[in-house]
Image: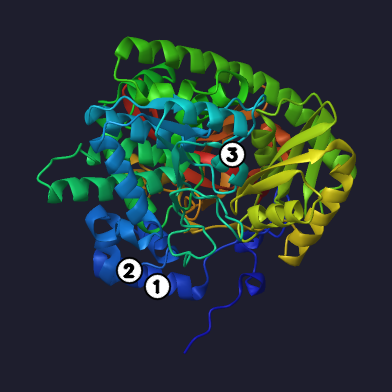
């Protein structure tokens, strides 16, 4: 039996031990090459596609099923989740008795999509539920006493989506109304006194479904509701038509694209391409999407615009957009969110520059990178934390201070559970509150306690292995000739998607390229045309190139040859599609 060499023991791919972004390139092992060759021979797939499948642990025998995931085969039984039976029973009882139902959601995409799922389903069944999304600045994340008391006065059932698992006080404050919680955030040792808390990340759950976002949990509730209605001879709303919302939430909430998540996103993208949801049609148009939607569009074009309402505008705009069936209202809401997103980018750029400078002054080689300052808008600290993580390869926390209280957000890296660490720091009393999930979390902290809280958080993350070793390596699926980068091969690779968290898009290297043209796009990006001498030139785009040495080196190439690394994608322009390299790294050849 052959033992596959550890990544650290492999020689640097193309001998790139330190690239222009400071990374070592790690290519496929001899065993990876052997598996890819066997996959090609048995399936007839192109080599790049075979490498993607082998990297995902797919065998030739199950390649066909992987390339065409069937939701019916992968969707779990809703009753596998604790409290689902009680949640579905109470939900349908409220519907049958025509009770007044309120939906309390988070202000991000997952919360908005989760709320929209319930609102749309209930509307189809003749119940117009009340939507409540808390204001990020005035109320903060999740249920609060005042809001729950007010909702309880006028409603019989409150369904909390993408929040509520840690809200013991607010749930108790909802006197006179029942509360059902549909969430996915990490729970504490005890649960609120709700009728049901359906959460795959409860401490008494197996964790097998811990990768689901809140919208998927809501979808499973609706699957069970439809099943019970069907047993009574009643036809429930079309659930397949709701998968566009589940796909959007899954990608935007950075849920790992594995198992059923992959199937939900694949099917959801197909549903979205039919352009039947007024809100998503309007938002796609305002974002100038002129091709079939992909996971990239969900994560980088639609998601940020929906989030903009909760970040710096009116918190319920996203959920209202996703739930409306009025095209005119959808257009108005989409235009408002697009304008807010532009404003958000301006605010983010300023905070990002200040936070990065502060983090670099403090040091970025430890287990945690963090920054805090007075006046930083709490609506952008999460995005800025993500930018710090991208730049440093470390978990990051960014905190905005206002009147002595800091509200922060953190982003993590693969293998480091930031949510659990923040929850522990909160339990120890160093944070006023905090929680989340593995890759993202939020916190509230007293201004004079930030240093102590961040020191403790750094210690906990170091124990998980954060900050050990040099900058993270760049993993490459293999070598590709520029002439092989055709639209057809890009489409074949996309069949192995969708790509995202837990299923990274494959990165390929193109060796010894000569740059035929280079021009700046804006202040931070670089557009290139390159050739390796094997055929026509290949277009490449390097976003954020001038955030590192990459931009200057390639712009001022002086005729030198470079090894290039990145992801292949299709660039659509004036009705034509061309393959393009989304350039992430380079090294002098």
Position of residue 256 in the picture relative to residue 276 (left or right): right
Can you identify the residue that label 3 sits on?
A: 170
SS type, badge 2: helix
Can you identify the residue that label 2 sits on?
A: 39
Per the model, the C-alpha gap separating discs 2 and 3 is 55 Å
Q: Position of residue 351 (x, y in %)?
A: 75, 27
Quarter-wise, where is residue 49 in the image? bottom left
Q: Earlier in the sequence, mark 1 or mark 3?
A: 1
Can you identify the residue that label 1 sits on?
A: 35
Is mark 1 in CB contact (under 8 Å) with mark 3? no
Q: Position of residue 418 (x, y in %)?
A: 67, 54
Asked whether the viewer can see residue 202, the reply is yes
Q: Position of residue 110 (x, y in %)?
A: 47, 38
Position of residue 460 in the picture relative to residue 106 (left or right): right
Q: Position of residue 350 (x, y in %)?
A: 75, 23
Is mark 2 in CB contact (under 8 Å) with mark 1? yes
């Amino acid at each position: 039996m052959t033992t596959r060499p550890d990544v650290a023991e492999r020689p640097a791919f193309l001998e790139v031990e330190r690239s222009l972004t400071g990374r070592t390139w790690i290519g496929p092992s001899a065993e990876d090459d052997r598996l890819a060759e066997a996959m090609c021979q048995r399936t007839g797939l192109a080599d790049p596609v075979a490498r993607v499948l082998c990297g995902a642990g797919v065998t030739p025998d199950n390649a066909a099923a992987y390339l065409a995931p069937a939701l019916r085969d992968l969707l779990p039984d809703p009753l596998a989740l604790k409290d689902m039976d009680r949640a579905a029973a109470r939900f349908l009882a409220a519907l049958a008795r025509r009770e007044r139902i309120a939906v309390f959601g988070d202000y991000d995409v997952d919360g908005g999509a989760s709320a929209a799922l319930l609102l749309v389903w209930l509307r189809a069944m003749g119940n117009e539920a009340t939507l409540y999304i808390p204001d990020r600045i005035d109320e903060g994340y999740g249920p609060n006493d005042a809001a729950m008391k007010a909702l309880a006065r006028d409603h019989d059932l409150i369904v909390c989506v993408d929040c509520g698992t840690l809200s013991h006080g607010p749930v108790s404050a909802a006197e006179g109304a029942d509360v059902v919680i549909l969430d996915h955030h990490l729970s504490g040792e005890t649960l609120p006194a709700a009728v049901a808390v359906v959460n795959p990340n409860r401490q008494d759950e197996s964790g097998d479904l811990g990768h689901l976002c809140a919208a998927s949990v809501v979808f499973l509730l609706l699957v069970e509701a439809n099943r019970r209605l069907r047993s009574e001879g009643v036809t429930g709303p079309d659930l397949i038509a709701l998968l566009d919302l589940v796909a959007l939430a899954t990608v935007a909430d950075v849920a790992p694209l594995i198992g059923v998540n992959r199937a939900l996103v694949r099917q959801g993208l197909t549903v979205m391409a039919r352009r039947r949801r007024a809100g998503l049609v309007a938002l796609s148009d305002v974002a100038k999407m002129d091709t079939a939607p992909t996971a990239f569009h969900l994560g980088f074009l639609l998601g940020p615009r929906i989030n903009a309402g909760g970040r710096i505008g009116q918190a319920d705009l996203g959920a209202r957009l996703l739930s409306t069936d009025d095209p005119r209202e959808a257009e108005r809401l989409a235009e408002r969110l697009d304008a807010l997103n532009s404003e958000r980018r301006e605010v983010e750029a300023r905070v990002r520059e200040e936070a990065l400078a502060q983090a670099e002054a403090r040091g970025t080689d430890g287990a945690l990178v963090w920054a805090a300052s007075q006046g930083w808008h709490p609506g952008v600290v999460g995005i800025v934390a993500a930018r710090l993580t991208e730049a440093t390869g470390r978990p990051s926390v960014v905190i905005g201070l206002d009147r002595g209280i800091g509200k922060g957000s953190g982003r993590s890296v693969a293998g480091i559970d930031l949510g659990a660490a923040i929850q522990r720091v909160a339990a120890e009393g160093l944070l006023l509150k905090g929680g989340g999930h593995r890759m993202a979390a939020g916190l509230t902290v007293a201004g004079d306690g930030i240093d102590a809280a961040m020191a403790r958080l750094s210690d906990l993350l170091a124990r998980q292995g954060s900050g050990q070793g040099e900058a993270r390596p760049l993993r490459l699926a293999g070598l590709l000739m520029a002439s092989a980068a055709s639209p057809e091969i890009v489409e074949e690779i996309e069949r192995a998607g969708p790509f995202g968290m837990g299923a990274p898009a494959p990165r390929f290297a193109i060796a010894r390229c000569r740059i035929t043209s280079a021009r700046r796009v804006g202040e931070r990006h670089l557009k290139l045309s390159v050739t390796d001498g094997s055929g026509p030139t290949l277009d490449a785009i390097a976003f954020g190139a001038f955030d590192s040495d990459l931009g200057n080196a390639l712009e001022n190439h002086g005729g030198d040859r470079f090894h290039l690394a990145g992801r292949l994608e299709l660039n659509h322009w004036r009705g034509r599609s061309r393959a393009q390299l989304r350039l992430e790294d380079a090294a002098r050849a």
